[in-house]
Image (cartoon, rainbow, N blue to C red):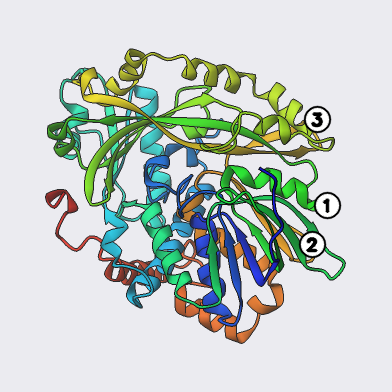
Amino acid sequence: MKEKDTVRTKSDVILIGAGIMSATLGVLLKELAPHLTITVLERLDAAARESSNAWNNAGTGHSAFCELHYTIENEDGSIQTKKALQIAEWFEISKEFWGYLAGTKRILDADEFIHSVPHYSFVWGEENVSFLRKRYEALKKYELFKDLVYSEDKNTVTDWLPLVMKGRDDSEPIAATKMELGTDVNFGTLTRAMFRYLESFPDVHVHYFEDVKDLERGENGFWHLTSNNIQTHEKEHHEAKFVFIGAGGGSLPLLEKSDIPEAAGFGGFPVSGQWLRCRNRDVIKQHFAKVYGKANVGSPPMSVPHLDTRIIEGKKELLFGPYAGFTTKFLKKGSYLDLVKSLEFDNIFPMLSAGMHNLPLTKYLISQAVQSHEDRISALREYFPEVKAEDWELVVAGQRVQVIKKDEEEGGVLEFGTEVVAAKDGSLAALLGASPGASTSVSIMLEVLADCFPKEIQSIEWKTKLKTMIPSFGESMKDNPDVCTTSRKKTEQLLELNQGTSISSKV
């Protein structure tokens, strides 16, 4: 069908993608500058259909309580704590913002999207037990981790994790850490709630089925975007002073089309994800925890296995994974040509170089892709010794595109994290990468505000409002125990966490 031209729309801000990142930035901007007009362009039929969807991500409130890959062991046996402390603080900042939104009734009640679910690390074997003990000792001294509990006692760990311990070899050394402050977050529900709040404003317009195809900077300094309406096949034009590209795996191709110098050299490595989902409700009832183990040697960080209690649409679920796989798609509902189309003159060498330096990763992904159901059950059996294969089914999770960037020494490096790429003049920003992503969305979007609205974020008006929404703004929870304690006490009340009634008894 021949595309038709429609009337161009104008706004102060365009957000590409209706996921947790765009929702967070949109709400922050509307709270800080109510006069701003905002347009959201999403290629699918609703918000949070891709990476923010509950079934497409882990749902762990990534706070580094249990994720062992955030605390690397040095050659001398010491434990790196910097990243764990940073992520723990970032998640507390997210909770502050969500608490503000829930407490002021800007979004739905907190128990619709966040629940208290204890976080555990669990390991076996002398070497891993030694590592976990040292990790506990290194983190326990900080206020952010003061409630972390460690045990090598099998009876204690059995009380904590009966499903994990039943049927296990009693002669094998084991250890676990427990953090009651852990949470499970339904980022899909949270995202949709924030978009409903945004759409309550007459000058915020969310357009679905809009597939952004191109964007360029006009002579007037505005960004001009062209999109195709998937339903009507019409070509539509949009114009804005500021553009945020928060399209998950679809961000890289759009960033490349912007032609901003800051985007040069960036590439992406797509990875697919899969879960085993429990179908036996009796088994699901026996486990109420997020249990993270240690990734096998040579495995990427995103492969850290976990036996994961989830609360999705008010129902308790149990997942295990993730299992990775190689794909050339950048989005779950994307094209197999996405990877090829992302290749450009300035990123071919970094991508080839990163590929050469990560051949074990490629081998790992291929091995994951060809696994049988029994192979996957065998991996699960390490965390659930008495597992029955017929109780579990394979479900496809979301796509992740890991960042590849230029490196003077190696040519190109593969990054397992997120990266904000912003134009020098602050007129455009894009978010690349994946984990920990959604859990740290508020801190990431504060970085976007600092890059793109530097004068405004230094103003008394913005600082005062940010302090209202995020009480710890401008202070450090890592360095100031009182700030951490005060923040947690307030957010636990606003988000109704750890109130003495376990969600496990309700769902």
Question: What is the crowding at mark 1: few (fewer than 14 residues within 10 Å), some, or many (at least 20)?
Answer: few
Residue at (58, 23) in percent of width and height: 361
Q: Mark number for residue 490? A: none
Q: Earlier in the sequence, mark 2 or mark 3?
A: 3
Question: Residue 387 sits in which quadrant?
Answer: top left
Residue at (52, 42) in percent of width and height: 80
Q: How many marks can you see?
A: 3
Q: Which residue is mark 2?
A: 424
Does residue 298 appear anywhere in the picture? Answer: yes
Q: Position of residue 143 (x, y in %)?
A: 39, 60
Query: Distance between the Cα atoms at labels 1 and 3?
Result: 17 Å
Q: Position of residue 396 (x, y in %)?
A: 41, 31
Q: Which residue is mark 3?
A: 349
Q: Which residue is mark 1?
A: 261
Element under label 3?
A: helix
The answer to whether mark 1 and mark 3 are in CB contact below 8 A is no
Element under label 2?
A: loop
Q: Nearer the viewer, residue 286 or 274?
A: 274
Query: Distance between the Cα atoms at labels 2 and 3?
Result: 24 Å
Report the side of 171 relative to 264 (left or right). left
Report the side of 505 relative to 243 (left or right). left
Check the image and report above or below for 1 versus 506.
above
Q: Nearer the viewer, residue 337 or 434?
A: 337
Query: Distance between the Cα atoms at labels 2 and 1?
Result: 9 Å
The answer to whether mark 2 and mark 1 are in CB contact below 8 A is yes
Question: Residue 460 sits in which quadrant?
Answer: bottom right
Question: What is the crowding at mark 3: few (fewer than 14 residues within 10 Å), some, or many (at least 20)?
Answer: some
Question: Residue 278 sits in which quadrant?
Answer: top left
